[in-house]
Amino acid sequence: MEVTALLVRYCRAKYPNLKYVFSHALVDPARRSDPGAQFDWERFIDLIASSENDPRSDRQALALAERVARHPKIEGLQPGEDCCM
């Protein structure tokens, strides 16, 4: 959950017009149920907001996003291609 919150903070820093974060289940309930009814949205939102104005969090999120982008199963993927880690 902490890593996902870092990624959301990174996306918000990079795309200032980003307004909403929602689940796959909301977008495609017929096929997806994640993250599930037990997902603690309140905690997740608190994690996103907790370091919103902390410049270190932007650097952490950027470093994490760059590491993920360099992962061998992700690097070189074209938009729309699937990836499984």
Image: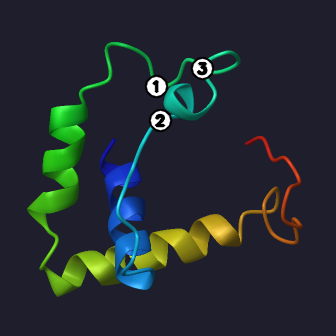
Q: Residues within 10 Å of mark 3 (few under 14, many from 20)?
A: few
Which amino acid does the dot numbered 2 rest on? Ser
Query: Do labels 1 and 3 touch, CB within 8 Å?
Result: no
Mark 1: which secondary structure? Answer: loop
Q: Amino acid at mark 1?
A: Pro
The image shows residue 36, relative to residue 13, as above or below, that is above
Structural distance between the alpha carbons of marks 2 and 3: 9 Å
| Nearest to the observer: residue 49 or residue 18 | 18
Check disc 3 and report the residue beneath it.
29
| Residue annotated with mark 1 | 35
**Viewer-nearest of labels 1 and 3?**
3
**Mark 1 Cα-neighbour bin, 10 Å: few <14, some 14–19, many ≥20:** some
Q: Is residue 20 left or right of residue 53?
A: right
**Camera-side residue: 26 or 48?**
26
Looking at marks 2 and 1 on the same chain, the residue that comes earlier in the sequence is marked by 2
Q: Amino acid type of disc 3?
A: Pro
Answer left or right for 42 relative to 68: left
Say which of marks 2 and 1 sits in front. 2
**Quarter assignment of residue 76:** bottom right
Left or right, 50 with respect to 12, comes to left
Q: How far across and how far down the image is residue 59, in percent?
A: 34, 83
Quarter-wise, where is residue 9 in the image?
bottom left
Q: Which mark is residue 23?
A: 2
Work out which quarter of the rendered image holds the C terminus and state it.
Answer: top right
Mark toward the start of the polypeptide (2 vs 3)? 2
The percent position of residue 57, horizontal first and vertical second, equals 25, 75
Going from N to C along the chain, the mark reached first, 1 or 3, is 3
Q: CA distance from mark 1 to mark 3?
A: 11 Å
Determine whether 29 is above or below 59 in the image.
above
Indicate whether 15 appears above or below 79: below
Q: Nearer the viewer, mark 2 or mark 3?
A: 3
